[in-house]
Image (cartoon, rainbow, N blue to C red):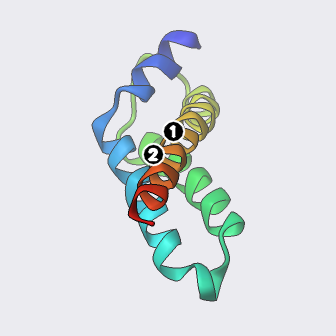
Amino acid sequence: MIDLVLSQLTDLFRIGLIIALVYTMHRTAAVTGRVLPLVLGVVFVAVMLPATLPSSSASFTDAILAGLVSNTIILVLVLAVAGLIARARR
């Protein structure tokens, strides 16, 4: 399971999707809020990637659970960088 999470943490497509999620959240925060779009986006990416790009080494459930963990870690890092960028712009 740890190997699966580590491999997902280095998946560039997953990282790009989370960055796009944070960018979209910032653009639409006045209408949709912040927390709900992020939570739903993390779950969507965690389910969508194993469903469309199946891996023979892990079960579907394990891939989703590992995706939730790795997406959350990536999201925290992306939000931290976005916060630093926003602070630097002021």
Which of 83/38 is in front? 83
Which of 61/22 is in front? 22
Pick the quarter of the image with the C terminus.
bottom left
Q: Position of residue 67 (x, y in %)?
A: 55, 35
Question: From the viewer's perspective, is residue 45 above or below residue 21?
Answer: above
Look at label 2 and name its amino acid. Val
Question: From the viewer's perspective, is residue 73 above or below residue 29?
Answer: above
Q: Which mark is residue 88?
A: none
Circles 2 and 1: CB atoms closer than 8 Å: yes
Which of 25/17 is in front? 25
The residue positioned 40% from the left and 53% from the top of the image is 19
Q: Position of residue 44 (x, y in %)?
A: 55, 56
Relative placement, left or right, of 24 versus 69 is left
Q: Position of residue 51 (x, y in %)?
A: 46, 46
Residue under label 2, please give it: 81
Relative placement, left or right, of 65 versus 59 is right
Quarter of the image for residue 13 reads top left
Relative placement, left or right, of 6 versus 31 is left
Question: From the viewer's perspective, is residue 80 above or below residue 63?
Answer: below
The residue positioned 52% from the left and 81% from the top of the image is 28
Residue under label 1, please give it: 77
Spatial separation of the CA atoms under disc 2 and disc 1: 6 Å
